Image (cartoon, rainbow, N blue to C red):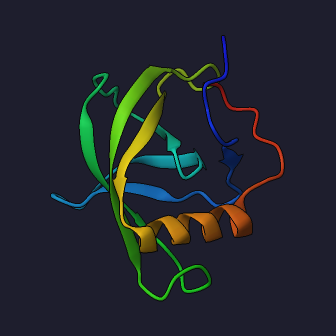
């Protein structure tokens, strides 16, 4: 499959929960992230092209606040190849503040591995 990303995502060495801020429920866990998008694993499938308001709680080593929030669109969703009860879900970030985008850069720098082998 042709790679359409503008920047390479980085696998994270930190297992960060992805939260729905409306009901404070954990939707899944972050697998990789870039300024353009992210991948999470989840116990539930999500419909394609759905826009979701998401929150990541962050630590003091990457931000002076305790969370970032943004709008992301589901681009793909498929069963995980290793854990059949999980779904791998790819998102495109469609709305984020400049301040929160800078925090994502710091998360990638601090917790991202050099090579991401996740799929598009």
Q: Residue furthest right?
A: 114
- Relative vertical location of residue 58 with respect to residue 30 in this rendering, above or below: below
Q: Tell whether 75 sits left or right of 50.
A: right
Q: Residue at x 67, y 54 (%)?
A: 12
Residue sitting nearer the eye, 56 or 103 = 103
Q: Residue furthest top?
A: 1
Is the C terminus in the top left, top right, bottom left or bottom right quadrant? top right
Percent from the top left, x then y, of residue 86? Answer: 48, 29
Residue sitting nearer the eye, 63 or 84 = 63
- Relative vertical location of residue 38 with respect to residue 54 in this rendering, above or below: above
Q: Residue furthest left?
A: 22
Find residue 99 and report its image quarter. Answer: bottom left
Q: Tell whether 110 sits left or right of 96.
A: right
Q: Residue at x 68, y 32 (%)?
A: 118
Percent from the top left, x then y, of residue 18? Answer: 41, 54
Percent from the top left, x then y, of residue 31? Answer: 59, 45
Q: How many marks?
A: 0
Q: Tell whether 60 sits left or right of 44.
A: right
Is the N terminus in the top left, top right, bottom left or bottom right quadrant? top right
Q: Residue at x 33, y 36 (%)?
A: 73
Residue sitting nearer the eye, 77 or 7 = 7
Q: Residue at x 31, y 28 (%)?
A: 46
């Amino acid at each position: 499959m042709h790679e359409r990303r503008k920047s390479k995502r980085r696998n994270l060495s930190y297992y960060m929960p992805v939260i729905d801020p409306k009901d404070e429920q954990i939707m899944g866990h972050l697998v990789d992230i870039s300024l353009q998008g992210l991948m999470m694993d989840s116990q539930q499938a999500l419909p394609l092209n759905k826009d979701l308001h998401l929150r990541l709680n962050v630590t003091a080593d990457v931000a002076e606040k305790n969370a970032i929030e943004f709008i992301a669109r589901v681009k793909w969703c498929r069963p995980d190849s290793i854990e059949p009860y999980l779904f791998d879900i790819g998102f495109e970030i469609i709305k984020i503040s400049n301040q929160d985008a800078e925090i994502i850069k710091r998360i990638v720098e601090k917790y991202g591995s050099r090579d991401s082998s996740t799929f598009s």
